[in-house]
Image: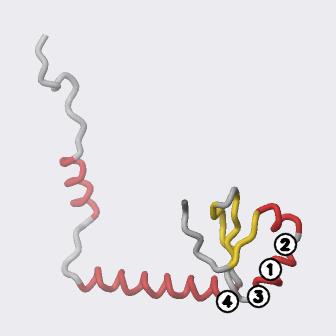
Amino acid sequence: MEQVLASRSVSITELKRSPSAVIEQAGSEPVAVLNHNRPAAYLLPPHVYQAMLERLNADLRVAIQAGIDSGPGISAEDVFAELGARYAEPAAGATGASS
């Protein structure tokens, strides 16, 4: 069973019946939207969604800076060459079986 990550929940049917009432009752709390008692979506107040995006952007900036600070970069060409060599398809007829 999937974990419901909100203290409030509502069925999709109830949400379709009265979306304004669900939003009003939720206030500033997130609401789990359930389909067959499993989370299908979450409704978030605009300020919560904005705060999440700001946090994700800040974390992403920190991660990018950490990557920059970790040492010299590797060119994309070198990375793709290494991946190509590592995961190259075997040549046709090179299966090791002889006829």
Q: Residue at x 84, y 72 (%)?
A: 19
What residue sits right under mark 3 in the picture? 27
- 3 and 1 marks in contact (CB < 8 Å): no
> Residue 23 bears which disc, if any?
1
Residue 19, numbered label:
2
Viewer-side label of 2, 4: 2
Amino acid type at circle 2 is Pro
Disc 1, SS: helix
Which amino acid type corresponds to the residue marked 4 in the rendered image? His
Mark 1 vs mark 4, CA separation in Å: 14 Å
Measured as percent of width and height from the top left, residue 58 is found at 46, 88
Q: Nearer the viewer, residue 70 or 49?
A: 49
Location of residue 2 with respect to 62 vertically, above or below: above
- Residue under the image location 69 percent in, 56 percent down: 36
Question: Which quadrant: the C terminus?
Answer: top left
Question: Are the residues flagged by discs 1 and 2 in contact, CB closer than 8 Å?
Answer: yes
Nearest to the observer: residue 83 or residue 78: 83
